[in-house]
Amino acid sequence: MNFLIENWVLIVAALVSGGLLLWPMLVSGAQGAGVSAAEAVQLVNREKGVLIDVSEPEEFAKGHVVGSRNIPFGQIEGHKSLPSNKALPLVLVCPTGARAGRAAGMLRKLGYDRAQPLTGGLKAWRDANLPVEKTA
């Protein structure tokens, strides 16, 4: 007991440190786990996953993942470019990953249980040296 009283600062620091280490895991679990760029490539190549870019058309034209479909975030519900097979994995992309996370949640509510955002968005895709194209 004497140890706890004399070293309360160290104990608080350890608890805070542990909490900060667990925080990203708790937050990503609440939003639905995203996939890394490498995992997205595997989903597309092995399981016929579909890449959907939820950026606005102007953002999409400036640069997007090769082979991705552009469905702006505001038009995602019931869009005709969504695959009819709801069992296919969907990888949602936007510049930072924020809109893609929200879009994945919306699509999961619509029955696309395998909808996942690309963690880090288009920036993470570029950082992984994966192909990006621009539209004229």
Image: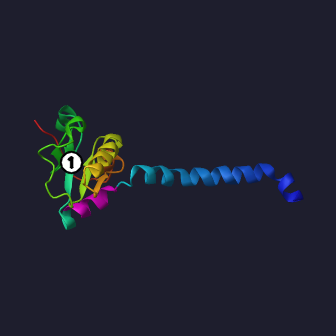
Q: Label 1 neighbourhood size at 10 Å, few (<14), some (14-19), many (20+)?
A: many
Residue visible at 64% across and 52% down in the picture: 17
Q: Is residue 78 above or below residue 114?
A: above
In the current view of this chain or complex, which residue is farthest to the top? 58
Q: Position of residue 129 (x, y in %)?
A: 28, 53
**Element under disc 1:** strand
Q: Position of residue 77 (x, y in %)?
A: 21, 42
Q: Position of residue 43 (x, y in %)?
A: 24, 62
Residue 38 covered by magenta stretch:
yes
Residue visible at 49% across and 55% down in the picture: 25
Count numbered badges in the picture.
1
Position of the C terminus by quadrant? top left
- Amino acid tagged 1: Ile
Residue visible at 32% across and 40% down in the picture: 99
Overall secondary structure of the magenta stretch?
helix
Which residue is more in the foreground, 102 or 5? 102
Pointer 1 residue: 52
Residue 40 covered by magenta stretch:
yes
Position of the N terminus by quadrant? bottom right
Which residue is more in the foreground, 29 or 110? 110
Relative side of 68 to 126, left or right:
left
- Magenta span of residues: 35-44
Residue visible at 83% across and 56% down in the picture: 4
Q: Position of residue 85 (x, y in %)?
A: 15, 58
